[in-house]
Amino acid sequence: MVIEVVRIGQRLVRDDRVTTHVALVARAFGASKIFMTEVNPEIKETIEKINKTWGGDFVIEFIDSWKHVVKKKKVEGFKIVHLTMYGEDINDAQKDLSKEKNLVVVVGAEKVPREIYELADYNVGVGSQPHSEISALAILLDRVHKGMQFNRDFPGGKRKIIPAKKGKNVLVNETRD
Ligand code: SAM
């Protein structure tokens, strides 16, 4: 299953850290790409550094129009999942979502444009209380992958963590700079 993420909107400066964390969660929880508008150009550098150190080839693409990306992805056969507290309960939607082949997950920052509710194949609520796009994305990806995303390999990194009950066990590949 290919999963990509679209972040709609960002409140200038205030959302910088949240946007970075949305991208980090997308990468760590099994998505391959995130689309976002270029309000925070350093984020690309941050994620490239993370890829270099910890592996994988997660991609950030800056876009002008979320609508253009969503419509294009629909034509390519992706199903659009819009995360919103007003949506269908994730406990009800997750069975159908797991059967889909490729997904684009849309998360907002502030109030999202009404049109996304219509363009989405699924409007999904992670509970019906307001919380955060970071938590909503993490839970959606975990439900869809059923925890198996953590078995994925992130090849090509300089460092690899060997899970340990105590302390830190990190393999360092000295051939990579
Ligand atoms: N009042 C805003 C609205 O109308 O959507 C909430 C914005 S919230 C700070 C930012 C994003 O977090 C939302 O666009 C949505 O993607 C996600 N989000 C927040 N709570 C959620 C929930 N309970 N279920 C799913 N997504 C949620």
Image (cartoon, rainbow, N blue to C red):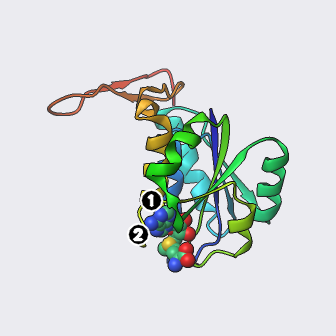
Tag shown at residue 131: 2
Sort mark 1 into few (<14), some (14-19) or many (20+) by Cα contacts within 10 Å: many
Q: Is residue 81 above or below residue 131?
A: above
Q: Which of these two is toward me, 55 or 11?
A: 11
Asked if the beta carbon under badge 2 is closer than 8 A to the nearest atom of ligand 1, the reply is yes
What's the amino acid at mark 1? Val
Percent across and percent down for residue 77 are: 79, 41
Q: Quadrant of residue 171?
A: top left
Secondary element type, mark 1: loop
Residue appearing at x 73%, y 66% in the figure:
118
Q: CA distance from mark 2 to mark 1?
A: 9 Å
Q: Earlier in the sequence, mark 2 or mark 1?
A: 1
Judged by depth in the image, the label closer to the viewer, 2 or 1, is 1
The residue depicted at 43 percent of the width and 30 percent of the height is 148
Indicate whether 141 appears above or below 156.
below
Label drawn at residue 126: 1
| Residue 20 locus on image (x, y percent) | 51, 59
- Compared to residue 165, the image places residue 113 above or below, namely below
Residue drawn at x 25%, y 27% as measured from the top left? 169
Q: Work out whether residue 18 can be spotted.
A: no
